[in-house]
Image (tube, grey):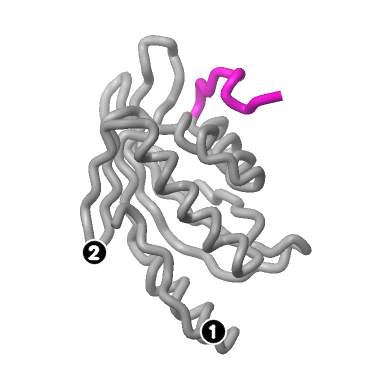
Amino acid sequence: MSLNNHPISSVNDLFDSYSAAFELLEAKTLAFHYHLPCYFITDEAETVFTEQSKLEGMFNQAKHFFRKYHIEKMEPEIWNKRSLTSLITEVKVIWHYKNANGTLLYSCDYHYILKLTEQKEQKIVTSISLNEKARMDAWLKTQNIVSKTLQIGK
């Protein structure tokens, strides 16, 4: 059963569904969680996705990185939710990346802007990575891995 057959009506539902899609590493299902156009912002880059196929391509690229380093689970810890309007919500999430055994590999902070669609589904409009690259680099160093970290949107 595909995850995108169920409406995502709450913030918690959105991030639980996103986490489940990550574990399946299905690019199409991950992209389903985003409103188009959507924005990815890091200290290094800003990327706008206007086409689902391009967004799916970015997730397919990420899939190879996560598989290579045995990152198989990501669990959301929602720290803050704030309604900006009746349709727009700002959310702070700490993502905990784990291996298949559930061992924590690294955590990182994201801020999201969500919008409730006409179909009453929460969708991500903006994804802001506060420290994923630094946390990922630090974890890779503890593993004695010299690698180019994942670059979102490049």
In front: label 1 or label 2 = 1
Mark closest to the chain's N terminus, 1 or 2: 2
Relative side of 58 to 88, left or right: right
Q: Mark 1 sits on what residue?
A: 145
| Frontmost residue, 41 versus 76 | 41
What residue would you read off at disc 2?
Answer: 43
| Residue 79 locus on image (x, y percent) | 47, 50
What is the magenta segment's predominant secondary structure? loop
Dividing the picture into quadrants, the one containing residue 102 is: bottom right
Identify which residue is drawn at 65% across, 25% down. Answer: 2
Magenta stretch, residue numbers: 1-10
* Label 1 Cα crowd, 10 Å radius (few <14 / some 14-19 / many 20+): few
Relative image position of residue 25 (x, y in whole percent): 60, 46
Residue depicted at 60% across the width and 67% down the height? 68
Q: Position of residue 70 (x, y in %)?
A: 66, 66
Mark 1 touching mark 2, by CB under 8 A?
no
Q: Amino acid at mark 2?
A: Asp
